[in-house]
Image (tube, helix red, strand yellow):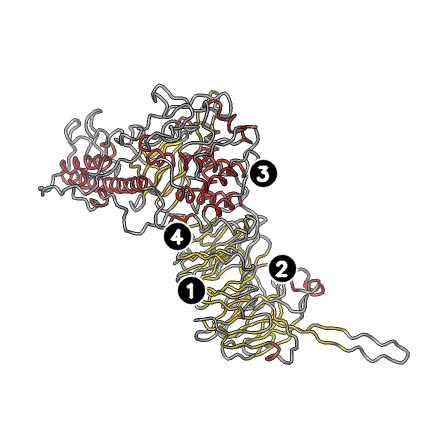
Amino acid sequence: MEALRQDDPRRFGPYTVLARFRETASAVRYLARDTDGDGRVVVTAARPELAALPAFRRRFQAEARTAERLSGGWVQPPLAGPEDDGLWTAAAYVPALTLAEAIALAGPLPERAVRILGAGLAETLSRVHATGAVLQGLAPGTVLLAEDGPRLTAFGPLGGAAGAEAREGGQLSVRLGYLTPEQVGGEAAGTPSDLFVLGLLLAYAATGTTPFADGPADGAAERIAHASAELGSVPDALRGLIAGCLAKDPADRPGAGAVAAELALEGAAGLARGGWLPEPVATAVTDQAARVRALDAAAEAGAQAGAVAAAGTADAGAVAPAGTADAGTDAGAAAPAGTAGAGIRQSDPATAQLALPRALPVPASATPEPPHTPASPAPGPWHAPAASPAQGAPHAPASGLPPAQTPAAARQPYAYPYPAAPAALPQQLPAGPSPAPPAAPAPGRRGLLTAVAAGAAGLVVGGGAVLALGSDDQAAATDDKPSAAPRPTVPGRAPEPRWTYTHPATAPVPLTAGVWRDELLVLTGTDRATALDLRTGRARWTSKDAAGAQKVLAAGDGLCFLAGPAEFLWLSSKDGRVEHRVRYADQFTDVPGMKVGPLTGLTGNVLWFTGSHTVTVKAPKPKKGEKPGKDTQVAKAYLFAYDVVRREEVWRTAVPAGRDGTPAYRLTAVRDADVVLAQDAATLTAADAKAAKGKALFRCFDRASGKPLWNRQFGSVSPTAAALGDEEGRLYAAVGSGLQAFETATGKPVWTLAGPEGSVFGTPVLAGKLLHTANRAQEVGAVEAATGRLAWRRSTEVPLGGNAPALTLSTGGGTLLAADSTQVTAFATADGRRLWKFQDIGAQEPKGATVSAPYRVLAAGKTVVVRRERAFYAFPVA
């Protein structure tokens, strides 16, 4: 971190720049604060000499879009970008050192830290690869070590480039930091290439060196392609895995999910709990955070002082003459070049930055960052960076690595094949708070402005000058211990789970999951039912009696109701003991051998479900001279209403049998007097499907008696179309690429919401007067249920393809969650703001394959449970 230079921008959109943060081959990163001063961000701005190239602009913008799509998990999510044609993007500031800085400061990481680092990066690669993309963004300068785990700045090849420069004729030259054997051979990078680079990065993290460093720098590509990796210094427990990642044949490298599971089966976040960074790195991260807070406080003080100055000038009604001591301090006044405060408006919150030193002092063990110099042209696709005259000698020997015996404090960041210019490390803050200064009279306007400028400078170099203004941030700026306050949630990243649970790998899947009264999460498989406490995620009980049951419903105080293959069960919510059981053969004696279909729904104490049985129809008695006919088997089906508290049938009504006997119905609408159902297309008989002529048939029944009221088709709604009804008498259904509303009483259309061409809407969700929607174009939105007027529409940023996301509304109604096979995206229901994204590494099967099962979400009180196959995560929501 260093002070702003004369030609550095002072603003990017809504962000006021505070200081230079880091530099890369292609961009400069600035520390900035947003308009309301509540958040700090890091703005990544393209270098001016590169931004002028059309090829670079296209690449920068493409990588920014990719970063947005891949954000979440351990990838820093972009918060904003330019509304004009500027080349910058902003992400939330997270206190962290780059991997290169950490190795330079403390030497190789301990094995546990390497595991957490590798697991976090592999988790990211797993979800990136699930979309069919290749990351190509791993490098010691793009990997951040934060207090709670690793982070990855999501700028792909540009972020991980060893050099980027403009060439004659408007050409762009970008040299990647890490190459792979297949790239050296002229082949394109694929997903296995990311695993090779991960192996190089883990070897560097574990040893402070690269496994292909032994030799001249200009022969590195040849060694990567043909030489054996030198892994003698890698810890034994990690050597085999890293060697597998560094296999020359891409087909021999493991998958990202398998690597993540081997490094940390409980996940990087779980393993990192309680701290994971070496003490010198953790201290530097804490110091950096304190310095940033102090710098931010100084900027705020500068803004307030500017307001005071502007008010004083307005009262005086005069502007100081140019050249006086106060010249340039009043709004609209400018001092001659070279005078203090020249050209500065004190109302600008960035004023104090001009008083900052040109560069931060750094510890003797750290190498100050040299000025940026364009990299020299490379004869081929790769070359080691050469030292420029301004830089002096390279940071490391020709191999780009410090000798193994070099003391940790004197080691330099890995310079091969990266630029030999690591960012300056944060200076250590004083071990304890500075003594409080003696009381002083309140300063005047000139004294106040002088103190603000001096305070800003002091804050950056150590925090001492902040005491001159009596800042409330004194302890934060001087205390080198980690803060006990909870870490704020990083925008775009899912909050910390309240708990996680992984169902045993020995238990068969699939599982059926259900919530009981916001208290239990009940999982039922073919071998058992398991109840988890929703507050802690701990197993409360298991029951083999409930094996194979479907759905979980509340059935009176302290009882869980489950429908099994042959019986209804009522289990104690405390211990899972069977309190009641009703076998179908015992209660439904006039329906012998009844098969129960998927439960249709529950309202209050009444459960709707379908059941069927087979009856024998005797052949008519043959006439004289005719051969006897054969008896036939005919399926009879019924829709039942059943009171789960009183444990008795309310009513039943005959309905057409399904393809396999038992039809399956979807509960479309529940109203005071009736219910509307639609039959699942998969259970329609061939004759029924033909008679429907490609349209869905909806059935309405009286709630009290079960009497059929009407059968109706709505427009061209197909049997497979998503549909939902409401209490106001409207039906909402997908029609073509749009969503259409109908009056259920008449079948007349009410309104139509157009969707993208070729898209299909999924099942909407009602929330008061709003109808939340999702479609296959990965758009989530809200419309007024009565009029169809669009309230908001957002993208999940998931690659196109597959079905529409499944929507779940939190119990409190403040959060809408969209789940698909790639991720879960949370939106604020009021305005559609994207709150966070969540992705895991997928379930690991015994052979190491990653199961890319779709995500599912269950709402329970102030918690949502996100499920992916065997893994469950409980997140807090509004």
Name which residue type carries label 1. Asp
Pointer 1 with pointer 3, Cβ within 8 A: no
Q: Is residue 697 left or right of residue 703?
A: right
503 displayed left or right of 631: left
Which is more toward the observer, 509 or 867? 509
User: Would you say the residues marked 2 and 1 are in contact, meaning their CB atoms lie under 8 Å apart?
Assistant: no
Dot in front, 1 or 4: 1
Mark 4 or mark 1, which is nearer the start of the sequence?
Answer: 4
Eyeballing the image, is 194 above or below 726? above
Amino acid at circle 4: Pro
- Counting residues from the N terminus, which is met first, the one under dot 2 or under dot 1? 1
Residue 201 pos. (x, y %): 44, 36
Q: Find disc 4 in the rendering and name its residue.
A: 495
- Mark 3: amino acid: Ala
- In the rendered image, the residue lying farthest to the top is 389
Residue designated by label 1: 533
Q: Quadrant of the C terminus?
A: bottom left
User: Which quarter of the figure has residue 723?
Assistant: bottom right
In space, the residues marked 1 and 3 are separated at their CA atoms by: 43 Å
User: Label 1: few (<14), some or many (≥20) within 10 Å?
Assistant: some
What residue appears at the point 31 percent right and 52 percent down from the top-left corner? 486
| Residue pointed to by mark 3 | 251
